Amino acid sequence: MPAPSGDWVTPARLSGIEQELASVLRTSDDVLVFQAEAVALLEAVARSIARPGIPCLNLVSGPYGRGFGIWLEQFGAEVISLEVPYDSAVAANAVEEALTQRTDIEVVALVHAESVTGTSNPVREIGPIAHERGAVVVVDAVASIGGTPLETDEWALDINVGAPHKCLGGSPGVSFASVSERAWELVRGNPAAPRDSFLSLLDWKEHWLDSDRSSVPGTPNVAEMVSLAAALDRIRSEGLDHVIARHELVARALRAGIVGLGLEPWAAEESAAATCVTTLRIPRDVPEVDFRGRAALYGAEVASGHDEMAGSLRIDHMGAGAQPSEVLTQLAALGQALLDHGHTVDVGAGVQAAATVVAAG
Amino acid sequence: MPAPSGDWVTPARLSGIEQELASVLRTSDDVLVFQAEAVALLEAVARSIARPGIPCLNLVSGPYGRGFGIWLEQFGAEVISLEVPYDSAVAANAVEEALTQRTDIEVVALVHAESVTGTSNPVREIGPIAHERGAVVVVDAVASIGGTPLETDEWALDINVGAPHKCLGGSPGVSFASVSERAWELVRGNPAAPRDSFLSLLDWKEHWLDSDRSSVPGTPNVAEMVSLAAALDRIRSEGLDHVIARHELVARALRAGIVGLGLEPWAAEESAAATCVTTLRIPRDVPEVDFRGRAALYGAEVASGHDEMAGSLRIDHMGAGAQPSEVLTQLAALGQALLDHGHTVDVGAGVQAAATVVAAG
Amino acid sequence: MPAPSGDWVTPARLSGIEQELASVLRTSDDVLVFQAEAVALLEAVARSIARPGIPCLNLVSGPYGRGFGIWLEQFGAEVISLEVPYDSAVAANAVEEALTQRTDIEVVALVHAESVTGTSNPVREIGPIAHERGAVVVVDAVASIGGTPLETDEWALDINVGAPHKCLGGSPGVSFASVSERAWELVRGNPAAPRDSFLSLLDWKEHWLDSDRSSVPGTPNVAEMVSLAAALDRIRSEGLDHVIARHELVARALRAGIVGLGLEPWAAEESAAATCVTTLRIPRDVPEVDFRGRAALYGAEVASGHDEMAGSLRIDHMGAGAQPSEVLTQLAALGQALLDHGHTVDVGAGVQAAATVVAAG
Amino acid sequence: MPAPSGDWVTPARLSGIEQELASVLRTSDDVLVFQAEAVALLEAVARSIARPGIPCLNLVSGPYGRGFGIWLEQFGAEVISLEVPYDSAVAANAVEEALTQRTDIEVVALVHAESVTGTSNPVREIGPIAHERGAVVVVDAVASIGGTPLETDEWALDINVGAPHKCLGGSPGVSFASVSERAWELVRGNPAAPRDSFLSLLDWKEHWLDSDRSSVPGTPNVAEMVSLAAALDRIRSEGLDHVIARHELVARALRAGIVGLGLEPWAAEESAAATCVTTLRIPRDVPEVDFRGRAALYGAEVASGHDEMAGSLRIDHMGAGAQPSEVLTQLAALGQALLDHGHTVDVGAGVQAAATVVAAG
């Protein structure tokens, strides 16, 4: 009488999933699969590295970066914050400068793509700079992995936290991270790092990664693990490069279309734009709530920004939603909804500008 | 050791499906579920009614109507054909006239919606006329059921053949028909009606409809039956009226948008336009094959017409595909693809014309 | 607006399915996939070969063999029947003798495994004998394919009708057949062979098998085709030989257990026993209906025989149900149910006899 | 371009799931759904109640009870442990006595059913006793909910932690708890209770339970939530009482069969036996590993016990696996496997003893 338990997640299947994820993360480091959403894993990472008084450089270009800094402080770290407006990226040379001023910094934490602001930080440049100074580089890659290139080993990233439900096109109930040996050393040296806890990275390291792997610890989220395996199958079948290119093309075409409509993209420069979502400044005279309903009626799903993002609109294009063939829809619906509200936009020009990008491929 | 058989299709489930279909067909007549696609059921119907020499009036406004007439002739009927060009509907008074000229006609056969031409016949008017003259009215409702009103009892239709995979949003491997007592009498009087055959309506009548219903005859297409039940659940949950209204709105908006782009709808009059697909005349100078690829790149799925339909394009909008929120996509993609081929269309005007219809609801 | 149609069944997918089926049937002949249950395909085969007056030798060892003969007669063939009691197989030398007496016989039709009686005919021996005499050999392999070896080419079988829902572990809504060139010649020479019909093999031959295969004719049973492809994937993954061995082992163990319980298997000799179902003679004093309910309560699904099978019980073990690990259940439940009805059986001895076979593998 | 996010889990769906769970838990207290497996929720509960120095009475009759006590100590509580051998239940009067000796005890923690030992504690009696003394009663009901009666309100239980993947027949990636007002007061008074954390019950209380419920906090495990909703649908459809009765019947029949085989159940008394798993003492001379393989060959899934459970075997029967029709299989396979190893058991007698219980219903 087999119990309806997590039997699907055998040691062999879990190992296979780890290998697929390592391939997606482009790393030979440990990859751990965490049985809850990415926010919980980010908390576990923050708790694991934040020993009392440890100096950490935390980059802030959106709410996720800000939130990670708050955790680091709560858990006792000394946080040096490097902040830019939410429509910009943190420049690599600003990081270099900060590390020159404070040579004792042990951790550099940053978000690759901020899914609320639609902006992106230059992880490719920042990783090697921080690594060279001896810092452990911690990247929140939740909204970038699968949507933009991420080279964990080449860029010397020590911890990369990812999730299946953004650009990888999966479901959100599990998350994952790569952890370098340098990062494990830092965690092992932290007496406050969680132990005997759901949030313990070290438990997982000892009971699974460094064990004989005869059995999977705990009771996995089996439905989510099946979903993750399916998402990784689709990624492999399509090809990671193609998945990334698809996200990049959609982001580029949508940005061109927004300009074509006569509107203003949120991200100040294209190099600072994320590929998972596109944000734009909404014309001042347009009431937000009605606008969303009208756009939905025409086939576009847009979200209004709040707080620092007030006056912006966001269009998501992640995973299965990142289809070049959907770009014209979004623009036609967005443009028409603005027209209906009395705002002057040129729908035909927006569509045409995007089509030019899509057709060029 | 239970065999992986059709056990799902119990007598109670089959009876429940029949009742749901009767409700969709708006009838208290017998409803039979046939374990193959609708074309096979149409053949079974033609064989069942076509006793040698029986005079049948067959309406032709597209290839399905033409094909049914060919079957009737093959099986020995005398076929009187009432034909119109493929962009038009057969007028009710033309049927009345034909029945006046030949008062011995026993069957009037017609197609409600022709899914290749995108045209529709006025079944509502023709049914009562033919019924009054004593004819058995046979309707191919495959492409109309769920997309346009169909009142079997009120309009006095004797046989209505439908299928799940068009406007009902299901899968094609089963089909169904309502059969009136008048129709059963006609079939019973036909010595050539199939017996002991997969194509026998009478077998089904005797071994299932008029039996004690203790067991389902044959081995049902269980995967397709599960799919049919799911489709009927969705219909009931959304409401048949809402499903029909959705198809009508999409067809109306798309037609308006086509005119807005500066193109010409195929169906001569809006009253002759089907709600399951929309056809338009393609500008002469546009090469067909490239055009389809370009439209697909931008998110529109269009099919080129052949034979009588040469020079036309078809856009399907059936079942889950009949979404008002998809209309702007289709027009933007269609318009942009034509623009790319050097044809002058006004994408913005097309989008706006459709949006006006969609917004009016 | 993509219609929810049979788009899944592309020409490439259909060709792939045909190749998998050819591999299961062990043939390089044409393989056709028929969009309805096997009984409809058997009817189509009977209609296709039965030209008026054609002499056919029809083997009868159960109801399916008898039924095929009735069709052949209805469609005009001269049927020579070779019949044995329903607990026996037709001997190969009896076929040889019949073909010696009537050298003009053009068709030899037989059922490989009769799923009602649980008996099996020696197709391996009969095929070559009939082939040598120039006859077209037509085999109903519906209940044997996947459960017992079947070598279409090696055994010179001209038409083999199979289905996914018995030993192949699939769903019943499609069926398939291999057709040799000798068989196609016979069908082409039959003026009564169906044309322009759902039951036409020739239509399929011309519009698909011998065409440029640019599009799939008709509208496939897409849910059933997906299910068929999945079943073939599982077969390939497990290995056809292993699937067959599993059925054989279960049948052998169950038969041993029945003897161990002190009961009598139905099939007179083990060589005449099918591997898809096992039948046994029920002790006279046991009331049938209660017995079934009691066996079900304990975990065995048994069916009572009717007509020629009155006084028998049948246990199915096909596809996913053919598990050696299920044999002890069936015997324990069967034995205990008989005990409850006051019949003397030795449950422990039955279980032990079956276990010996299972453990030997 | 809708992102593949947790949109399925709307506030209305989450509220509906909570109501279903409240009905299963028989309570009008708050019910919270936790987005990770039950062990994580138990940790969250332990952290939430364990303020430094708080005196807690912890009942230990198996490893889950022991583990909860270790957490309470780690988080700073003073733990008074009430322990019995792992084949017995903690008696209600022992709890009463302990509470009389230490009248300052604020928490009584116990496990309802220990799924490793197959034993059960008398929560029905202990709850009211502890409640009357003013203690917060914390029950680990993970392995009992759905398999045995549990009356949260009637028995005065303050926190009940449950999970879908045991007797409720669901999937393990989410868990749930009822929390009484008395329990919330205790947690609010604990300055160490988690905040801004995945493990915070108070966050969930404030941001969801006591909020305007306009949006679901965090990103739910959507695949697991769909699975939970499906499990609750099945429970409601079958009826909770019937689900519980099914587990009880299976446990009773299996225990009778084990005695019938001549073996010894682990749980000292039937009243101390859980209904989710059944454990037995394995005859000394039987090698464990081979035994498991042989039992599996015959259709029984048994697990060997370790540590305190060394020398025992466990058979799970939870959720869909709790079928009276499976009991005879387990016994026949278990008995035959023991016979194969040279141990004397009476398979027939075991089967018959179980069948008597099953047939009595």
Image (cartoon, coloured by chain):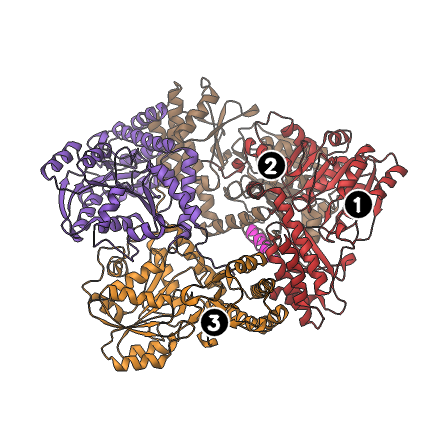
Chain colours: A red, B orange, C purple, D brown
Distance in Å between CA atoms under marks 2 and 1: 32 Å
At label 2, the amino acid type is Glu
Q: Quadrant of residue B45?
A: bottom left
The residue indicated by pointer 2 is A20
Label 2: which secondary element: helix
Nearest to the eye among marks 3 and 1: give it: 3
The stretch of residues the image draws in magenta is D11-22
Q: Quadrant of residue D294?
A: top left
The residue closer to the viewer here, D161 or B72, is B72
Crowd rating for badge 2 (residues with CA inside 10 Å; few <14, some 14–19, many 20+) = some
Q: Is residue D18 magenta?
A: yes
The residue indicated by pointer 1 is A70
**Relative image position of residue B296 (x, y in whole percent):** 55, 57
Q: Along the horizontal axis of the image, is B51 left or right of D73?
A: left
Q: Judge whether B295 appears above or below B87 on screen.
A: above
Nearest to the eye among marks 3 and 2: give it: 3
Distance in Å between CA atoms under marks 3 and 1: 63 Å
Q: Along the horizontal axis of the image, is C129 left or right of D281?
A: left
Which residue ends up furthest to the left in the rendered image? C101
**Relative image position of residue D181 (x, y in whole percent):** 67, 50
At label 1, the amino acid type is Ile
Cβ–Cβ below 8 Å for labels 3 and 2?
Answer: no
Q: Predominant secondary structure in magenta?
A: helix
Q: Which mark is residue B176?
A: none
**Relative image position of residue A9 (x, y in whole percent):** 55, 36
Q: Are marks 3 and 1 on the same chain?
A: no
